[in-house]
Image (tube, rainbow, N blue to C red):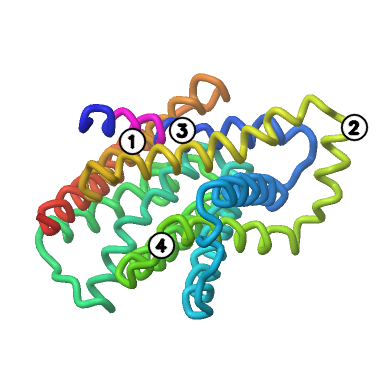
Amino acid sequence: MKHRAFIYIILAGILWGTSCLFVNALKPYNLTSLQMVCIRGSISAVAMCIFVFFYDKSIFKVSGRDLLLYFCSGAAMYFTAAFYYAAILKSSASTAVILMYTAPVMVMVYSVAFMGEKFNLPKGISVFLMISGCALVSGIAGGLKTSILGAFLGLMSGVSYSAYNVFTKTQMNKKCNPLAATLYCYIFMAICSLIPCKPWQIVMVATNAPVTLLPIIGCGICTCVLPYFLYTLALGVLPAGTATALGVMEPLSATIFSVVFLDETLSVYSVFGIVLIMVAVFLLSRTANEEDV
């Protein structure tokens, strides 16, 4: 069963990495990054509602205190996707996903500063590697030609994703129902995304160009519903630290997809920066795994 769980995590990472392909497929139809977030959030929310309705309707019932916490995680997921998709459009898929993946290190810094988590040498090395990797990937060092706005948006997606992880960790500490947390996270993400995105324009695009229906549906199913389902199955067997370490498949697959299918090029500096950030995340995940034992 553990071997199967490893496969689930790897598949989830690959599916998360396909986001750049769906964003690129919808880009010619003048859909904004916020509208793409709306597509992802709305389809995910509908899919989760259908699943919970047939699985266990009692999951819909939650306390007001938990609902506020779920709203925070939904808003954080919305901003993560909004900044991430905008970073893809303004810079490149490889830059966007790598900068977003600085989130685990940001969570560690927050946990040490505000949640009483102990700081040790591996964590310090992780911070140093992350900062160095970000400098190379974003173009601050190495002379890489990357949009400053794109690099900023990528880092903001990492900040938002770290906030999502903090809220999720709080939910786990409060023994919240994981399905309820996921359900309302997607619902609130969808609600947040509907407000600024002019959803009727998405309907018009889908109506006038039926060819967009496949990437629109795929954006929600392939980049959100399926990978989360596989990741949840794996967490039932693997320690959280191991699962997070294997999650480096997401930036790795996104980078490969961007080079193979989107004709993006990577300089030596950017490759080195990617490696540094991935090593930082892997090292931090292994440290967390040892602390959980």
Which one is in front, 206 or 57?
Answer: 57
Range of residues picked out in magenta: 7-12
Q: State the residue position of label 4.
A: 177
Which one is in front, 18 or 85?
Answer: 18
Up the image or down, 77 lies above or below 3; here it is below
Circles 4 and 3 in contact, beta carbons < 8 Å:
no
Q: Is residue 87 visible?
A: no
Point out the tag, 1 or 4, that comes first from the N-terminus.
Answer: 1
- Provide residue 192's location: percent of width, then percent of height: 66, 63
The quarter of the picture where the N terminus appears is top left
- Viewer-nearest of discs 4 and 2: 4
The label shown at residue 208 is 2
Q: Residue at x 46, y 33 (%)?
A: 254
Up the image or down, 260 lies above or below 120; here it is above
Point out the tag, 3 or 1, that comes first from the N-terminus.
Answer: 1
Element type where label 4 sits in the image = loop
Inspect the image, locate mark 2, and give the three-letter code of the amino acid beneath it.
Asn
Circles 2 and 1 in contact, beta carbons < 8 Å:
no
The image quadrant of residue 177 is: bottom left
- Viewer-nearest of discs 3 and 1: 1
Left or right for 82, reference 13:
right
The quarter of the picture where the C terminus appears is bottom left
**Distance between the Cα atoms at labels 2 and 3?**
30 Å
The label shown at residue 254 is 3
- Viewer-nearest of discs 1 and 4: 4
